[in-house]
Image (tube, helix red, strand yellow):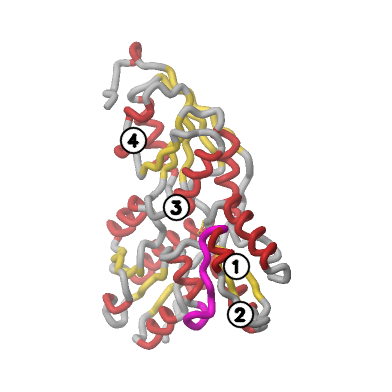
Amino acid sequence: MTAAHPAQERPAIEIVLAAPRGFCAGVDRAIQIVERALERFGAPVYVRHEIVHNRFVVDTLAAKGAVFVDELDEVPAGAPVVFSAHGVPKSVPAAAKARRLAYLDATCPLVSKVHREAERHHREGRRIILIGHQGHPEVIGTMGQLPDGDVLLIETVADVAKLQITGDQPLAYITQTTLSVDDTAEIIAALKARFPGIEGPKKEDICYATTNRQGAVKAIAARCDAMLVIGAPNSSNSLRLVEVAKRAGCDRALLVQRAADIDWAQIGDARAVGITAGASAPETLVEEVIDAFRARYEVTVREVSTARESVQFKLPAALDVSAA
Ligand code: SF4
């Protein structure tokens, strides 16, 4: 481990900051929903699952009075509960209504859009193939918009060949919002090659934030000796950024949750280090990581911006408290 040095002994290093990085509009909205609920109802406000996949965000909200639970039966009768940004199966609001809980749905509107697509295809008689990662909360929520067994999940190009589709029911595909843009394009191409009539979304299901963060990493990866992706190990979009960086030419791409996680031996003799952050990682953690570099290196920071983002999502009307 490299210890902090006095200024005159510090080696020079360039930090190449990817932009856009960090919080997206859906994460920002979800956090605001919890904060507004705390203001409106007072603590405790219950939150089903991590509101977004970031420990720092969860701990900060918990310090303000949010209580994170795995399932609704842990929420006392009458207490307010928020559903996370990843979306929930239909059974969850139904159970909340049955228990007469006041609930707030912080599902990202871009995830809700995929839910509506799934419902439309189902209504119009199509069999739905979902491209996504098994077990991810968003995938559980999307599959849970329709009856059990009505959505087929695939994760890879190889899965396309294994699909057992019988009869002549028309097909449609939808995707998780936080996938690798390039991997997903390959899977979609394989689906279209095998099922030429398959329908897909008019515009990508992969969201603007995922696409832009991957684009920014691609633009800087080849010129960086190492890349730090600030994000959680269960954050799909952050994990994809590590893969994208490696594929775009930066073999030393590492996921860190915050500065304390940095293995300085792995930074080693790097002269240019890229930094980005997943959509659920706040900018304060980026600043913390840069400060940790400043304690060890003579740092110059250069930001490379590949897209401008102005997306903002409205909060639910009057926080849209839906009491049964
Ligand atoms: Fe919404 Fe995309 Fe952000 Fe997920 S990553 S919360 S889908 S904007």
Residue 151 among those drawn in magenta: yes
Relative to 182, 136 lies left or right: left
Viewer can see residue 278? yes
Cα–Cα gap, marks 4 and 3: 19 Å
To which residue does mark 4 refer?
262
The residue sitting at 32% across, 33% down in the picture is 263
Q: Is residue 31 above or below residue 239?
A: below
Viewer can see residue 110? no
Dot 4 and dot 3 residues touching (CB under 8 Å): no
Mark 1 surroundings: few (<14), some (14-19) or many (≥20) residues within 10 A: many
- In the image, 98 versus 163, the foreground residue is 163
Q: Nearer the viewer, mark 1 or mark 3?
A: 1
To which residue does mark 1 refer?
174
**Amino acid type of the residue that numbered disc 1 sits on in the rendered structure:** Ile
Sequence-wise, which precedes: disc 1 or disc 3? Answer: 1
Quarter assignment of residue 234 = bottom left
Dot 2 and dot 3 residues touching (CB under 8 Å): no
Sequence-wise, which precedes: disc 2 or disc 3? Answer: 2
Q: Is mark 1 within 8 Å of ligand 1?
A: no
Cα–Cα gap, marks 1 and 4: 36 Å
Q: Position of residue 48 (x, y in %)?
A: 35, 69
To which residue does mark 2 refer?
166
**Amino acid type of the residue that numbered disc 4 sits on in the rendered structure:** Ile
Q: Position of residue 8 (x, y in %)?
A: 35, 11
Q: Quadrant of the C terminus?
A: bottom left
Mark 4 surroundings: few (<14), some (14-19) or many (≥20) residues within 10 A: some
Residue 208 among those drawn in magenta: no
Q: Which mark is residue 159?
A: none
Q: Is residue 115 above or below residue 24?
A: below
Q: Is mark 3 within 8 Å of ligand 1?
A: yes
Mark 2 surroundings: few (<14), some (14-19) or many (≥20) residues within 10 A: few
To which residue does mark 3 refer?
280
